[in-house]
Image (cartoon, helix red, strand yellow):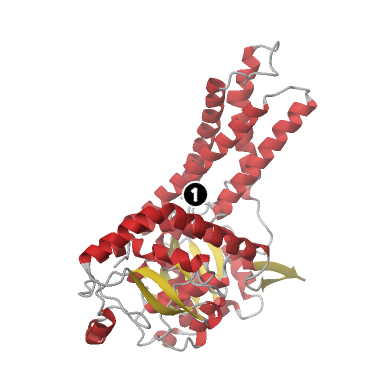
Amino acid sequence: MPYDSFEWQQDPPPSNGVPRSAWTRSHRRLSRWHRPYTLILVLLDLVSAILASVLAVTFIQKASSGFQGRGPGLFYLVALVGLPLGWLFILWANGSYDRRYLGLGSEEFKRVVRAFVTVVACVSLLAFATKTQLSRVTIAYVSVAALIFILFCRYSARQVLHVARRRTGHGAHRMVLMGTLPEALEVYTAVTRSPAAGLIPVAIHLTDGYSAARGIETPVPVYASRDVLALVREVGADTIAVCGSASAEPGELRRLAWALEGTGVDLVVAPQLTDIAGPRVHIRPIEGLPLLHVEEPTLSGPGWLAKNLLDRVAAFFGLLLLSPILGVIALGIRMASPGPVFFRQPRVGHEGRTFRVWKFRTMDVDAEERKATLEELNEADGMLFKLKEDPRIFRFGSKLRATSLDELPQLINVLKGEMSLVGPRPLPADDGDYLGDVRRRLLVRPGITGLWQVSGRSDLSWDEAVRLDLYYVDNWSLTYDLSILWRTIWVVLRRKGAY
């Protein structure tokens, strides 16, 4: 956004820390993208609820049961006006329009589902209280249809917002990072990995003096010994991000929050705790001191048991249903290149145990012997070896790689318990000792797909691939697995990073 898009008024009087009423705020928030976005969501939610009622009235004959003798006008008033407005009120009461949850993460959708449960409970309670014999089929149809429409519309609106953020920068927050240079650069790297998040760092305000940045190339301008509010105005920012130990002095962060009251500038705190997802982090205030409590990763228990069961069942039925396709692929490999159909290579699995992975062969039979002659052409780094135009891959094999069909035989490994549907990528057993951070990825079974695959696959650097694998290990959940499986479908269809 251009700097002049922000309207600055005269400086507010110094704050004494007394909270101000949001209704009498003289300075509106500088970041106002969420206001039109929220209005669009309200309209979409209203249309979704009305559409669900219209469909129920149209296709269910007994939709108006319970209103006989009360006149059709009352029924249509309740179905087309009362119920949709009730949806809006309950969505609002559940925080579905809270700007903190809009545009990113799953919390917005969780709150919509909570609103759905509340709507069903309220309708049932009102029907019981008024002794109205409503059609159960109609109630279920209207509620579920409205939920599906609302979720679909909100997901679509979010995708449009993400596109706008990536292409034009609209709907984003312009941030000033405040802290030491290493801390600020770490936060910069984290927030710029996902342009869809809508966080654009525009400046760094150093707390340890400008000399700390001397001779170091930085992605945004660096300032020191400046008034933070004046700097925010100068660069056209709307958010200050306090990074790591920038608030080491007791009371400093509190005084900064006081100074920002009435200015319209948002304040966020980025602690030195990266790559740990929200469900593992809890704020526990003790005598006014907010402590971040970090739970251990959940790699056991009912959820882990459900993951193992899901893996085995999905692998069994997957092999059963895909057997005709597997047969056709095997025949194609036989016709395209002499040699075995499958390529079996030792890989390192759960807790360092070695197993032999099943894959369709996509390279010539002497590919391993020729690898040494191609080492200097390697386009990957770390423990990876990748060539976009690898001469060892035969033509039919390149098609299998582009569509990821060469990975299907790994369902055999999943059925045997050596792999999972979702997990870190299985690396060859001769690629190192897996020391340091890399070894942590062996806490879970490797997967056919994973966070690395839905985030760029072969286009990623080794460090980024390791970071994603460790993030998955530290933040695993069954819901996360299902979301990765869903994202994998679209990545495979787009053939992103597959070679």
At 50% from the left and 40% from the top, the residue drawn is 39
Local crowd at mark 1 within 10 Å, few (<14), some, or many (≥20)? some
Q: Name which residue type carries label 1.
A: His
- Is residue 243 rendered to the left or right of residue 410? right
Residue 3 seen in render = yes
Q: Residue 195 appears at what percent x and percent y?
A: 40, 61
Q: Residue 355 appears at what percent x and percent y?
A: 47, 78
- Within the image, what quadrant is residue 404 found in? bottom left
* Residue sitting nearer the eye, 95 or 448: 448
At 44% from the left and 45% from the top, the residue drawn is 156
- Which quarter of the figure is the C terminus placed in? bottom left
Is the residue 335 above or below the residue 79 in the image? below
Q: Residue 213 appears at what percent x and percent y?
A: 40, 84
* Residue sitting nearer the eye, 164 or 326: 326
Determine the secondary structure under disc 1: helix
Is the residue 165 above or below the residue 387 in the image? above
Q: Which residue is mark 1?
A: 34
- Is residue 181 rendered to the left or right of residue 384? right
Figure disc tally: 1
